[in-house]
Image (tube, grey):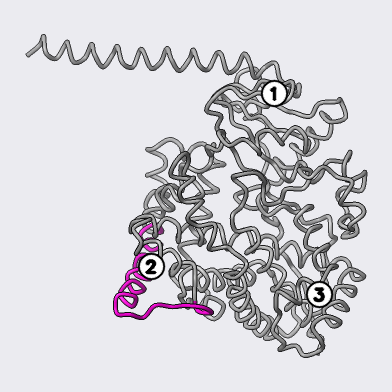
Amino acid sequence: MFPLFTAIFSIIFIYFLYRTVIFFTDLYRRKTLANKLPRTSDEHPIWGVAPIWAKLDTAGILEWELKNANELRDQGHDVWCLNFAHENFILPLTGESIKPILESKNEITKGLGYDYITEWLGTGLLISKGEKWQQRRKLITPTFHFRHLENYVKTFNNHSKIFVEVVSELNGEEFDAVPYIKRCALDVICDAAMGATADVQHNPSHPYVMAIRDMLWINTEYMLKWQYWFPPYYYWSGMAKLYKNCLNILHTFTKKIIAERKAKRANGEKTRGTETNFLDMLLEHYDAGEIDDEGVREEVDTFMFEGHDTTSSGVSWAIWCIAHHPKVQQKLYNEILEVIGEDQEEIITTEHLKKMTYLDQVMKEVFRLYCPVPQVNRRLQEDFQSGPYLFPKGAVVTIAPILLARNKKVWGDDVLSFDPERFSEERESKRHPFDYIPFSAGPRNCIGQRFAQLEAKVMVCWLVRAFDFSSNLPFESNRAGTEAVLRPMSGIPIFAKRRI
């Protein structure tokens, strides 16, 4: 008995000793290489920037990053390495310096911040890597072809019209636009992703809606507050129970919709043409044996997660910008009248949007100043040469569109002002293509970016056509919090005066 126990204990001890040696050997090598990269001087020698970030809210962290990024660029650096305890974060600061990692076909593994939502989303397109990611990307790309986007535009119009009706009932009183925009975006994505009608705009307490809201809050809390990383506290706080409850609601809802859709298809009720949604297109691949039940569920949940919060952020900031720039708002309204006409019930088409060049400039400037997804991470699987710099294996490369989009050397000293003329054809041609990447770039760019852009434009058109927006708060007073999406810390408190 005892010799066997001793042998087992010895094997376990040797294994953990081996893993510990490997961990610290890799850590030492990574730290040694990372310390050769440009850094700021205010890091703690052991904890790095952790003590600094602990004192800041999410808006403060972004402001701190922007300040340091511009200072480093002024010193001639185009890469920044910062340490957070044992982790190394490498931030390319210019379009040219970020190009190698964006164009890499090998370094596409997601970094920190995604593990916690894997139980919800599975390893769908957002989180998967390697062969699975390549197979899913190839499978799903055709579903965002322009001929399918035409069908989605009808969905955007239907729910934007309801949005206008809901806001009209407020009778011009001040309101926070964020929850209203989120509800509209959720109605859009439920319809487009699953062909389901949640009617969130008239039913804001829908269990699925509440579960998504709580899940996104849990994810942010878990990422930013280290005490939740300690399992006893995580369970004692009630966070684990809330997470499991949300997960059950989200998965039950999605699986129910998928089962119902599969049953209808089995009875010969297959949608085609104008009725096709994302789920139906996935089930075509399911019927062909190219994806299984769990794969369908993963991709529908991923589309739901990615497809509503980013659009909500973009449209929210668009309304904030428009409300504070009357000349921009009037010029945009005039273009809408010129292209679409005075009928406020007129459906907005892709042909209309192609003609609206000023709307395009406005939305590009919104996405520049307030990138919906401020940053994403990649975990390096091997040492990576980027120009004169060697990024060590195991480090996290942070792709931060918002740092690139607020680079004073590219956008000028008035980088924090809102100016759609930055995206005139002449001025656009003078910039590096990777100085502006609100939807990332390269092989792992946002697959649904055209979907998101069209949805945002249709929603903004319906809103500006119906309302004259204004706000009592100064434009600069609304700080931006860098979370899963760029969150307006003060909400979007505005007045919406009906035009007619």
Stretch of the chain drawn in magenta: 246-275
- Label 1 belongs to which residue? 43
Q: In the visual, does 235 lie left or right of 470?
A: left
Looking at the image, tell me whether mark 3 or mark 1 is earlier in sequence order: 1
Residue 470 percent across, percent down from the top left: 83, 72
Residue carrying label 3? 469
In this view, the mark in front (1 or 2)? 2
- Indicate left or right for 413 with 317 as reference: right
Q: Secondary structure at mark 1?
A: loop
In the picture, measured across the screen, residue 268 lies left or right of residue 330, that is: left
Rate crowding at label 1 as few (under 14), some (14 to 19) or many (20 or more) other CA atoms within 10 Å: some
Q: Secondary structure at mark 3?
A: strand
Indicate the amino acid at tag 3.
Answer: Phe
Q: CA distance from mark 3 to mark 2?
A: 36 Å
Q: Position of residue 249 (x, y in %)?
A: 38, 63
- Whether residue 355 appears in magenta in the rendering, the answer is no
Quadrant where the image shows the N terminus: top left
Residue 58, above or below 364: above
